[in-house]
Amino acid sequence: MPVVGDTNVHVQVNGTTFAGIYETVGSRVELMSADFGDHSAEIGSGNSLGVVEQLLRNLAEQAIRSGCVFVPDNAT
């Protein structure tokens, strides 16, 4: 469940939308995704939204390549 300070993030990979919730904590972004679990990344010189979008995109692309079972946000 989202808490105060969390922000939604969505990316499309191969026509499928993947979603997560993230929070900026110091110099890191903390991503929580129902499909991929919890992950974090250093923000560095980028912006937090761009970093977390790339992190989510990388996780989705890796899952698709490996044949991982997941439930995309836009599943019906």
Image: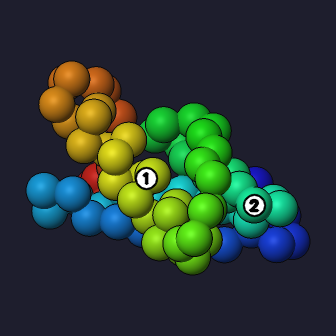
Is residue 17 visible from the viewing direction of this image?
A: yes
> In the image as oriented, which residue stretches furthest toward the left?
14
Question: Do the numbered discs 2 and 1 sit on residues whose CB atoms are within 8 Å?
Answer: no
> In the image as oriented, which residue stretches furthest toward the front?
45
Q: At numbered mark 1, what does the secondary structure look like: helix, strand or loop? A: helix
Q: Does 29 sit above or below residue 62?
A: below
Q: From the viewer's side, name the closer residue of 60 and 71.
A: 60
Q: At numbered mark 2, what does the secondary structure look like: helix, strand or loop? A: loop
Is residue 8 visible from the viewing direction of this image?
A: no
Q: Residue 35 at what x, y percent from top left?
A: 46, 40
Q: Which residue is mark 2?
A: 27
Q: Which residue is mark 1?
A: 56
Q: Which mark is residue 2?
A: none
Mark 2, other Cα within 10 Å: few <14 / some 14–19 / many ≥20: few
Q: Give me the C-alpha separation between circle 2 and circle 1.
A: 18 Å
**Mark 1 is on which residue type?**
Leu
Mark 1, other Cα within 10 Å: few <14 / some 14–19 / many ≥20: many
Q: From the viewer's side, name the closer residue of 34 and 54.
A: 54
Q: Residue 74 at what x, y percent from top left?
A: 31, 60
**Mark 2 is on which residue type?**
Ser
Question: Earlier along the polypeptide chain: callout 2 or callout 1?
Answer: 2
Q: Residue 25 at what x, y percent from top left?
A: 81, 60
